[in-house]
Amino acid sequence: MIIVRQFSKKQYLLAKMIVMSAFIVSGLIVIFLGLGIFLDEPQLKKEHHFDDTLKFKDNSLGDFRINFNAKSGLMVNRGAEPFIQATFHENQLNSSKVEVLFLEGNVINESDRWGSTQKNNPVSLKFEGTSFIDGTNMSNYIASPYLTYDFSGRYGAIITIQNNDTNFKKDFDEVVEIGSWDDYILEKNTKNSMGLTWMIAGIALITVAPTFTRLVDLVKEYFE
C-alpha cells in the first residue's frame, strides 16, 4: 500500500514520458543508422602495386614495377591509369626497345593520346635517365599509357627488352584485377535493402511507442 501512495500523478506522467522518449530516441537512432547504410557506397579499389624482378642471361638483375592509380576505380571500362617502370643495366645507355603488352587490355600510348584504343597494343617505354643502385648504373624506362578492360577478371602482362646485347621476354600471370559492375550493383542493392530494413524498424519503434506507454497505465491500475 505504501508503493501505491508513492505513485503520484506527477510520477505517473513522468514514467509515461520516459517510456515514450526511450522508444522515440531508439527509433530515431535506428533510422539514422539505416540511412547511413542506405547511402553508403561500395568501396572501389583504386590502387594496386605490382613489382617483380627481371633476371637476364648474364645473371644481371632488373626491376619491373606497375603502379595503378585509377581515380574512378579499377573497374570495367574505366581507366586503370598505370605507371610502368623498368630498371636494368645497359652497356650503352638508351639503346633498348622496351615494350609491355597488357593481355586483353585496350591501350593508347602516350605518343598517340588522340588516337583510339587498340586491344593488345604494346606499350612503348621511353628512356628516363639512370639510377645508381648497388654500385651499378641502371637505366630507367617508363610509360603512363591509357588502359581499359572490357571485362572483369585478373589479367597478366608481358615485357620484352631488345638491344644489341639481349633479347629478353618475361610473362606475368597476374598484374591487375578488374572489378565487376554486376558485383558492385549487387553489393549496393544489399546495402539498400539492409538500410531500408533498419529504417522501417526504427519507424516501427516510434509507431509502437504509445502502445508501450500503456504498460505504465497497467502498472498503475495493478497497484490501485
Image (tube, rainbow, N blue to C red):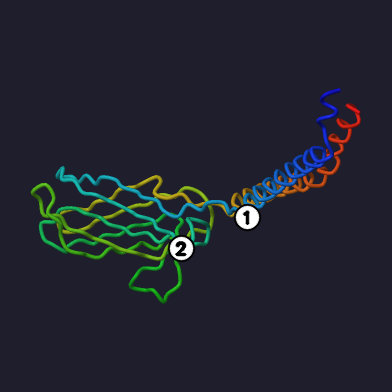
Secondary element under disc 1, as helix, strand or loop, is helix
Q: Quadrant of residue 110?
A: bottom left
Q: Earlier in the sequence, mark 2 or mark 1?
A: 1
- Check disc 2 and give the amino acid type: Gly
The location of residue 33, given as percent across then percent down, is 64, 47
- Residue position marked by numbered label 1 in the rendering: 39
The residue lying toward the viewer, choosing from 7 and 174, is: 7
Q: Give the alpha-carbon distance from disc 2 to disc 1, as whole Å.
A: 25 Å
Q: On the picture, is 42 further left or further right than 195?
A: left
- Check disc 1 and give the amino acid type: Leu
Above or below, comparing residue 217 to residue 135 in the picture: above
The residue lying toward the viewer, choosing from 141 and 32, is: 32
Q: Quadrant of residue 4?
A: top right
Above or below, comparing residue 88 to residue 93 in the picture: above
The residue lying toward the viewer, choosing from 215 and 204, is: 215
Q: On the picture, is 73 further left or further right than 218?
A: left
Write the residue at 37% across / 59% down: 82
Which quarter of the image is occupied by the N terminus? Answer: top right
Secondary element under disc 2, as helix, strand or loop, is loop
Mark 1: few, some, or many residues within 10 Å (few <14, many ≥20)? few
- Residue position marked by numbered label 2 in the rendering: 79
Nearer mark to the viewer, of 2 and 1: 1
Residue extending furthest toward the left:
135
Write the residue at 24% across / 49% down: 63
Write the residue at 78% across / 43% down: 17
Q: On the picture, is 74 further left or further right than 218?
A: left
**Disc on res. 12:** none
